[in-house]
């Protein structure tokens, strides 16, 4: 089965908050990431959280981690049209190569 | 710094043809990776090179070969292209294999007819 799962699409109105959700299966995950892919471009690391943290905030971005439910979320406050992109959740495991396992990506569409 | 560069950006092949995708990074990174991205499938690791002189298989290595030419360059070769290899290919690099951040190139869009 898939190690990292996320919904495929999310549509929001400009100015609203966006919440992108992700579930993962490996309880030994050490790092959990959010990557952003803009149209026609490669992935860019947006933010990450260590597994010993519950929350991380970085300007408009808030990452919440629920280790019990193996649930990760990314909240984007005051979503702008420039935030339209595909957002990938990923996990990696300490002691291994740290190569991330990616989810399928959530396409965020921001309407004016 | 250019970061991670990939050539070509687009390529169309006929079934059975061969080609090499080129990747180079100028960040002095030790580790490099090749992924493929298919619609609705996320990224899947094809091969990686933890350091110069080493290569290892990833999740989907069949039909591909790689060469870590030097510290900067990591190429991906399709010896006999198949329609199932139609995909977008991304190269990435990281300072070393235990680094949490990977830096991605812009991708090569490959179509095999």
Image (cartoon, coloured by chain):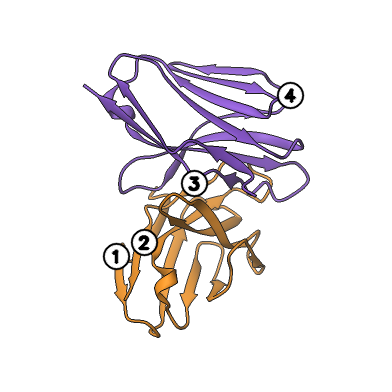
Chain colours: A purple, B orange
Task: List x then y, in percent, for residue A8.
Answer: 43, 38
Camera-near label (2 vs 4) is 4
For disc 3, the chain is B
- Kindly identify which residue carries mark 3: B103
Residue at mark 2: chain = B
Q: Which element is circle 4 on?
A: loop
Q: Which residue is mark 2?
A: B108
From the image, state whether disc 4 or disc 1 is nearer to you: 4
Alpha carbons under labels 1 and 2: distance apart: 6 Å
Evaluate whether label 4 is on the same chain as label 1.
Answer: no
Q: Could you say whether the residue bearing mark 3 is in a helix, strand or loop?
A: strand
Foreground pick, A31 / B105: A31
At which x and y percent is residue A40? 31, 49
| Residue on which the image places disc 4 | A68
In the depicted structure, whether residue B10 falls above or below residue A69: below
Asked if labels 2 and 1 touch by Cβ distance under 8 angstroms, the answer is yes
Neighbor class of circle 2 (other Cα within 10 Å; few <14, some 14-19, many 20+) is: many
Q: Earlier in the sequence, mark 3 or mark 1?
A: 1
Q: Secondary structure at mark 1?
A: strand
Q: Position of residue B65 (x, y in %)?
A: 55, 75
């Amino acid at each position: 089965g898939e190690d990292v799962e996320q919904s495929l699409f999310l549509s929001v109105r400009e100015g609203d908050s966006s919440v992108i959700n992700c579930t993962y299966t490996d309880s030994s995950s050490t790092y959990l990431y959010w990557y952003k892919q803009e149209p026609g471009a490669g992935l860019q690391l947006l933010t990450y959280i260590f597994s010993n943290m519950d929350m991380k905030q970085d300007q408009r971005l808030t990452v919440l981690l629920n280790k019990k439910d193996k649930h990760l979320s990314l909240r984007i406050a005051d979503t702008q049209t420039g935030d339209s992109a595909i957002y990938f959740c990923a996990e990696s495991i300490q002691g291994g190569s740290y190569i991330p396992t990616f989810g399928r990506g959530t396409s965020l569409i921001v309407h004016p | 710094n250019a970061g991670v560069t990939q050539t070509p950006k687009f390529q169309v092949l006929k079934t059975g043809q061969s080609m090499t995708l080129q990747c180079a990074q100028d960040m002095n990174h030790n580790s490099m990776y090749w992924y493929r991205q298919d619609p609705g499938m996320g990224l899947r690791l094809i091969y990686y090179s933890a350091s110069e002189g080493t290569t290892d298989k990833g999740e989907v290595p069949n039909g591909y070969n790689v060469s870590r030419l030097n510290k900067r360059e990591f190429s991906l070769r399709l010896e006999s292209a198949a329609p199932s290899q139609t995909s977008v290919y991304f190269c990435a690099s990281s300072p070393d294999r235990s680094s949490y951040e990977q830096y991605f190139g812009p991708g090569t869009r490959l179509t095999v007819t």
